Image (cartoon, helix red, strand yellow):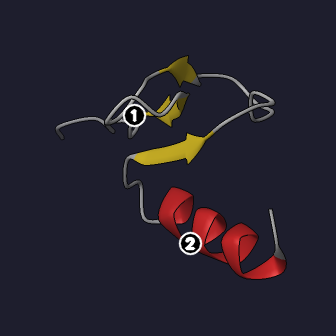
Amino acid sequence: MGPGSSLALRLALEARLPVWVAGEPRPQGPGWVPLALAGVPGWALPPVQGGLF
């Protein structure tokens, strides 16, 4: 992953957006789940929902 991809990933995580990363290896950190999109294997990190109040 290049520096542009790393920046995009960091910004998406800070904005609490869902993220999908293609291929291996599994990204570091908790919460990543395997998910294939259009037959391409990868890893998804669903957004963390904060408290309602």
> In x, y percent, where is residue 7?
69, 76
The image quarter in which residue 28 lies: top right
Q: Secondary structure at mark 1?
A: loop
Query: In the image, what residue occupies the spot 65% across and 65% down?
Result: 10
Q: Secondary structure at mark 2?
A: helix
The kind of residue on which mark 2 rests is Leu
Q: Is residue 21 above or below residue 40?
A: below
Residue of label 1: 46
Query: In the image, what residue occupies the spot 18% across and 41% down?
Result: 53
Query: In the image, what residue occupies the spot 58% across and 45% down?
Result: 21
View extreme (top): residue: 34
Upstream in the sequence, badge 1 or badge 2? Answer: 2
On screen, residue 40 versus residue 4, left or right, reads left
Quadrant holding the N terminus: bottom right
Q: Is residue 38 above or below residue 41?
A: below
> In x, y percent, where is residue 17?
37, 55
| Closer to the camera in the image, 27 or 51 | 27
Number of residues whose C-alpha sits closer than 10 Å to that of mark 1, classed few (under 14), some (14–19) or many (20 or more): some
Residue of label 2: 11
